Image (spheres, grey):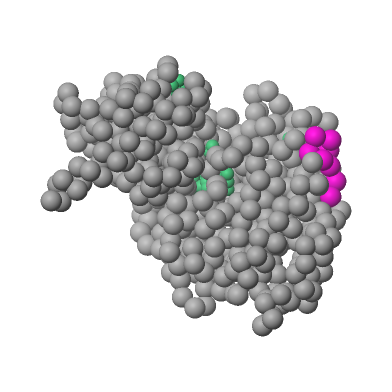
Amino acid sequence: MTSLPITLTINGHRHELEVDPRVTLLDLLRERLDLTGTKKGCDRGQCGACTVLVDGKRINSCLALAVSHDGANVLTIEGVARGEELHPVQAAFIAHDGFQCGFCTPGQIMSTLGLISEGQAGDDPERIREGLSGNICRCAAYGGIVEAVLEAQEQLAKSDRRTAA
Amino acid sequence: MRDFSYFRASSLDAARQAAALPGTMLLAGGTTLIDLAKCGVAEPDTLVDITHLKGLDRIDVNERGATIGALAKMGHIADHADIKSRFPAISEALWQAASAQIRNMATIGGNLMQRTRCPYFRGPANFSACNKREPGSGCSAIGGVTRGHAVLGTSEACIAMYPGDLATALVAFDATVHLGERKLLVDDFFLLPGSTPDREHAIEPGEMITSIEIPSSAAAHRSTYLKIRDRQSYEFAAASAAVGIEFEADGRTIRDLRVALGGVATKPWRARAVEEALKGKVLEPETVRAASRLAVEGAVDHGANHYKIELAPRVVARAILKLGETA
Ligand SMILES: Cc1cc2nc3c(=O)[nH]c(=O)nc-3n(C[C@H](O)[C@H](O)[C@H](O)COP(=O)(O)OP(=O)(O)OC[C@H]3O[C@@H](n4cnc5c(N)ncnc54)[C@H](O)[C@@H]3O)c2cc1C
Ligand code: SF4
Ligand code: FES
Ligand code: FES
């Protein structure tokens, strides 16, 4: 198949790439760009392990054709921390045991970032569960995940207030 | 996935012209199409990417109704303030569909066109018989595992359930699908399987959904979408109901009622018998429950899906009574 030229900005870096039109964003990240933090669970949109942010919105990268997202800005789990300093969402997942095996965790964290920026969940655990229902955890670490999201939201709101002051 | 070539449409006309060619399929959010390509069900020669077309994602709401462009995302519509306030059932149907990730990718054009979740249809590697996929090959579901299959609108050729939530709400409120100039009621857009289950929509090669229009009505304004599923979220409906109601000035007598069922039929299913039975009646739990049974008149089960015949009327009754409480 003829490859097609696309440009993607991934974690702040611009990439000019030639891709087979069948390649999903997920496979491009993992197999071409060695960004293996984004996981492949079901490969069918059913588990959320492959969640990344595209132009600020959470999506399942396993159902996204890379070529269709030409020009997009992609954030993966590798781009979330600032150097050695963890993002408050990452720190909260560790503090609250928001995982066991960790396979779903990059997707959970990216989905949480999306949820927080959508501003839908507030501090209501029920709405957090609903808002994150696209991320399945086979270890059922859901209790810790919800606690982590609650705490991360609180931390982020505090630092927002500090920046505003 | 089989090899295909990729064409990015730069205009509506270019998209329609390209899509008229055999073997060509439109690509919107890809959440049905890429999934089915991976399952080996969709085998396009060419994909025409319409996601870069401008202006097709608009949502306009005025007194007459709402017009929603085919490329508007499910999540965007669900969260639109005017849709929430004037068409609550539409917003609720979308909120309860799929996951936040999918709602950020999926468009309403693609949403209407989503295919059945029948596991035999989705599994060509293991099940060769499927009249929807391969006309004349038989139906693996009949006599197989049918828990998720339809009880209304079925035929001897196919009992596949239409799984979409949005279209169920659209059919309740007389929405139309715009295919460029041509307009069709959502009810007429979806076809019964009959002897040709491979043909699901009244859309011709070279046509494309450009927008959806939902007329305003008092019933749409006071409406809700109730979805019952095997798990609380991120699951297709076991049975669902889109209901809208308008009362007479007394606040108890039903002037207008809209009822549509999801999760139980081969297409979005308007339950007119329930509507007619209750119009002019005072809203009373017993009357509502009795009339709601008419929703499944003529239903046929295939064993494991029998529960839907019991469940659907209860979902309808609960949705109507819930709307009554907010009177
Ligand atoms: C895990 C999972 C769970 C889901 N759960 C639900 C649920 O609970 N409720 C629900 O309602 N849906 C659910 N869905 C289905 C989802 O809503 C649809 O996949 C989605 O809406 C399809 O939109 P899309 O833009 O991604 O379409 P695509 O996949 O891009 O296209 C789908 C089909 O429509 C055609 N098409 C696209 N746009 C047009 C157009 N403008 N005109 C004509 N044809 C067009 C394409 O050629 C293709 O055949 C779920 C999907 C997944 C994967
Ligand atoms: S129910 Fe319809 S889609 Fe499912 S196997 Fe039978 S013919 Fe195919
Ligand atoms: S790998 Fe994408 S949703 Fe499961
Ligand atoms: S931590 Fe193991 S799948 Fe979630």
In this orientation, which residue lies closer to the viewer: B326 or B106? B326
Verify whether residue B297 appears in magenta.
no
Q: Quadrant of residue B224?
A: bottom right
Q: Position of residue B82 (x, y in %)?
A: 45, 67
> Is A102 rendered above or below residue B211?
above
Q: Position of residue B7 (x, y in %)?
A: 40, 45
The magenta-colored residue range is: B299-306
In this orientation, which residue lies closer to the viewer: B88 or B298? B88
Would you say the magenta stretch is mainly helix, strand or loop? Answer: loop
> Going by the image, does B250 lie left or right of A93?
right
Q: Quadrant of residue B101?
A: top left
Q: Can the viewer see residue A131?
A: no
Residue at (19% x, 33% y) in the render: A13
Residue at (36% x, 36% y) in the render: A149
Verify whether residue B301 appears in magenta.
yes
Q: Position of residue B158 (x, y in %)?
A: 77, 42
Q: Position of residue B106 (x, y in %)?
A: 47, 47
Q: Can the viewer see residue A146?
A: yes
Q: For the C terminus of chain B, which image quadrant? A: bottom right
Q: Residue furthest bottom?
A: B249
> Going by the image, does B98 lie left or right of A80?
right
Residue at (39% x, 26% y) in the render: A98
> Going by the image, does B68 lie left or right of A79?
right
Residue at (56% x, 35% y) in the render: B36
Quarter of the rendered structure image containing ligand 2: top right
In this orientation, which residue lies closer to the viewer: B26 or B75? B75
